[in-house]
Image (cartoon, grey):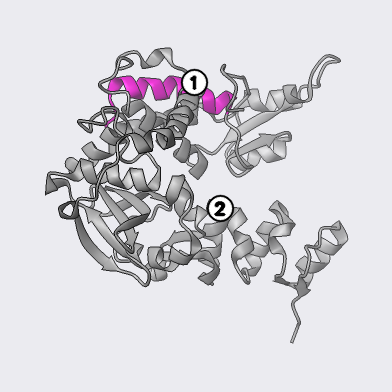
Amino acid sequence: MRNSTVYLARNVVNAPELKARISARSRERGDSAEIEAWLQNHFYRYLVGNFNAPPEAVQAITTTEALQQHYPAGAPAWALALLARKPGPESSPNDAVLWWINPSHDSVLALERQLLEFLQSRQGTSLEGKLARINCPQALERWAQEHQAFEAQQLAGWRQHQPQAVQPLWQGSQGEFVELLPGSGVLREEMAYESQMMRHCLGQFANRRQLTGGYGEHYAEGCEQGRMRIFSYRTGQRQPRITINAWLQPDGRLRIDQIKGKQNRPPVDRYRADVIAFLNQLHTSEETPDDALGMRLLRTSGSQAGWHAVETLHSEAEHLQIWQRQPRLLAHVPQLSPLVQWLAAAHDSSLLAGQTLPPALAYSLEQAGKTPPSTQPEVQR
């Protein structure tokens, strides 16, 4: 749906909550009035009409039972009436469908961050003060085009590594994590070097001579103002391999924002253990960004709080956290707790491939014709 240049229409039952959560996050960040208004208008309309994501983020509701799962205290009357309405001869199947969108799902938050990066990069350009003229599909298309153009611009202004711009923080098995220093006087030069080597937007400035404006300004200002910290994992001759940025929270903890490999891809698996160990050296909040989930990492809470590879998590509470955040990662857990196995079976039984199942669950799946491959019933002793 992203390619559509207009806003589509859907009956989203929790649309008021979506708008309220967008506004609340914008106020918490301290967005400018123009950006806040744009998000309330264009981002909200895109979520309601155009946004497409997995069922845990965007769910079609076709029965009153499904609707009541989201509203145990009582569903809106208009929504119940819509589901009860009999379709006419010219009605399409979607006329009787409601939609529910999780306002805090990772995919929603990731898209919001992407748009925020685009909007903030317009400061100091001819579009400043004119953002209302750009709708959300257009903004996403421009973001994509600009990022594709970054590679073509790399060779036009090669930057050298600035040793005084970085401070070694932690030595890993294959490389070293350094922090880019805002007080070095050459922060922006090192950011440009990082982007040039990694081919991402961290140090992509609109004015490439003066290193101002554009996407780079967003990150440079955050770092210079003490609101953001930027880390780089480097090997060999100071070669950047991974870029991590994190926002400083009021309680002093760091909220990990992005973990990028080259060309915005997930870091390669051979560096994964070092990433986990480094993240556990930091005082981080409990949020797990999409990039970490893409590496099969999860920030857990409780007695074993910290960053972990999902395949090393064993407790039911941790499995529930994976289920709530990213069900597809359950396929990487060697043996799930029985409760989560039942939840996964109801969602997608293929996630249970290779699992040892309780006899009752194995029987239920067999009767439903949904037995995943290579599963074994649990032996009763």
Q: Residue at x 33, y 34 (%)?
A: 156
Q: Which amino acid type corresponds to the residue marked 1 in the rendered image?
A: Gln
Asked if disc 2 and disc 1 are in contact, CB closer than 8 Å, the reply is no
- Looking at the rendered structure, the number of numbered marks drawn on it comes to 2
Q: Which span of residues is magenta-colored? A: 30-50
Residue sitting nearer the eye, 245 or 25: 245
Task: Check if residue 34 falls in the magenta segment.
Answer: yes
**135 horizontally vs 54: left or right:** left
For the N terminus, the image quarter is: top right
Give the x, y percent position of residue 38. 39, 21
The residue under label 2 is: 326
Distance, label 2 to label 1, CA atoms, is 29 Å
**296 horizontally vs 282: left or right:** right
Question: What secondary structure characterizes most of the magenta part?
Answer: helix
Give the x, y percent position of residue 316. 55, 68
Category of crowding for the residue at label 1, using alpha-carbon neighbours closer than 10 angstroms: few (below 14), some (14–19), many (at least 20): some
Between disc 2 and disc 1, the foreground one is 1
Q: Can residue 227 be seen by looking at this rendering?
A: no
Q: Secondary structure at mark 1?
A: helix
The residue under label 1 is: 138
